[in-house]
Amino acid sequence: MSAIVTVTNLHKRFGSLVVLNGIDVTFEQGQITTIIGQSGTGKSVLFKNMIGILKPDRGEIWYRDTCVTRASEDELIELRRSFGYSFQGAALFDSMTVAENIAFPLREVLGIRDKREHSKRIAEMLEWIGLPGIESKYPVELSGGMRKRVGVARSLVTKPEVLLFDEPTTGLDPVLGETINDLVVRVNEELGLTCILITHDIQASFRISDRIAFLSDGVIAEEGTPQSVSKSEHPMVRKFIENSFSLLEV
Amino acid sequence: MGDGRTVPLYFAGSLSISRGRAKLCFVIVKWLIGGLEELGRFVLYWGITLRGIVRRPFRYWLILEQLESMGVKSVPIIALSSMAIGMIFALQMVSLLQPFQAEVITGMAVAVSMARELAPVITTLMLIAKNGSAMSAEIGTMKVTEQIDAMETMSVDPVHYLAVPRIIAAVIVFPVLTLLANVIGVVGSYVIGVLVMQVEGAAYLDQLFTGLLPIDVISGLIKAAVMGYIVALICTYQGFKTENGAQGVGNSSTTAVVTSSVAILVADYIMAALMMEWWF
């Protein structure tokens, strides 16, 4: 396994609020890594730094041999093609149909203008996520789980190498949540993508992840395989795990 | 002012002023700094949109979409409001000029007023209400539902994609609809002046075409284009500034409508003064 994204000593603050206070974490190629932590600890800020939407105050992020934090705007445009981003609320363009949503990155990112090529790729993507034939529907006509899957399809259509999932199961019932977790595993196993997740679904994260990183007080407080993290003595990690798994026992 | 107690202020050296005055000074300074910051952000946004207008890719289909929603779909409301203004203005003018037997100049008075001032201002105000608020709300909703973030993750510049087509369309649509408002306003004034108030038709039209000069119409169209630019700039800016969910979207739309309405009136006065100086 080789590192695909490396974060070194990353600092980010908004005004007087310190959000990231020296993050060091490495994401291995082809693995599923989950970042867990309390709300407001900067997990989404870390994602936005990774794709260059936010600039860190200090520290570096490397994608393979490219330094994201020192990349020019043109380099960032190229670099972002290697990343897909699945948003918490799917962030589908609500004025566009499902087909237009998926065609958007084809046209704007890959520069493909051929309508027949669009239709072919859209149909393939919808088939792959298990939602064929919904091309003409608008996001408002879809359920939460369907929207999230279409959001994943939109991220995948440009064939990125790394897919970032921002709280993929939040707001979904356990059954729908499980379908999204299955989708993450399929993305990783069938397409070979590196998946990085932010989630509060601790049980699922221990089940599907290769590695887990626990973000607390602006730093990675614990990192390792699910087995090693489950044995952590860090009080916040223990609290998270005990609360999550005691619920399972009930 | 204040409770009579005095506190030393570090910026006042050896001076001591009351706590109330210190608080007032602090509020004023904070307000001024906030205003300057806001102005700076707006100027920066202005620069980004200017660069966006000349930068590729040129998404002509988005401009066409905006021309349709801003222009074609606004024709009925512009026709209705300009017809009403022309009719009301004619009614007032005829009754005012009749004692002097000068009612034949009503057509000219309405046409010149419409061309120079009323048509661009009324058209712009109607378009602010219909399209300005919509621009702000659409972009604001996209902001709070992370659709703007989604564009950024795909390396699509949201200002270039969302604001620039709206700005270009506004600069085209506002003068076209102003021209329409001119024509319909004059027709409305003719209906009231000639058909209802029995002013002599040929003299009415003669005065109208003698008094109304091309420069009157052109100056109004220039004003409309500038106002369209200002409205689109302010309303899209307010959209991108939106925060805090549905309430924030509502606040942005309100601010966009109020700010752009005031801005176009100020701009209108400045343009009118300059045009008076140079052309009329």
Image: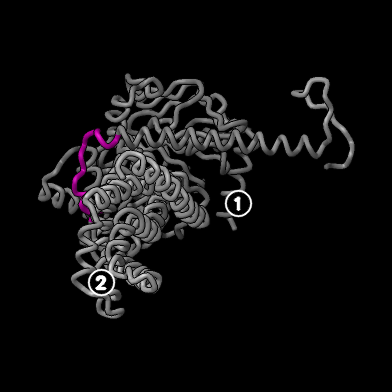
Residue A137 % position (x, y): 26, 62
Residue A17 position (above or below residue A205)? above
Name the residue: 40% across, 36% down. B45
Can residue A35 be seen by looking at this rendering? yes
Residue A107 % position (x, y): 20, 43
Mark 2 lies on residue: B190
Q: Chain of mark 2?
A: B
Residue type, mark 1 in image: Ser
Q: Is residue A135 magenta?
A: no
Residue A148 position (above or below residue A50)? below
- Classify residue B262 as left or right of residue B227: right
Snapshot quadrant of residue A216: top right
Name the residue: 31% across, 59% down. B114
Q: Chain of mark 1?
A: A
Q: Residues within 10 Å of mark 1 (few under 14, many from 20)?
A: few
Mark 1 lies on residue: A246
Residue type, mark 2 in image: Tyr
Front residue of B136/A130: it is: B136
Front residue of A127/B270: it is: B270
Snapshot quadrant of residue B161: top left
Q: Which residues are magenta?
A: B52-67
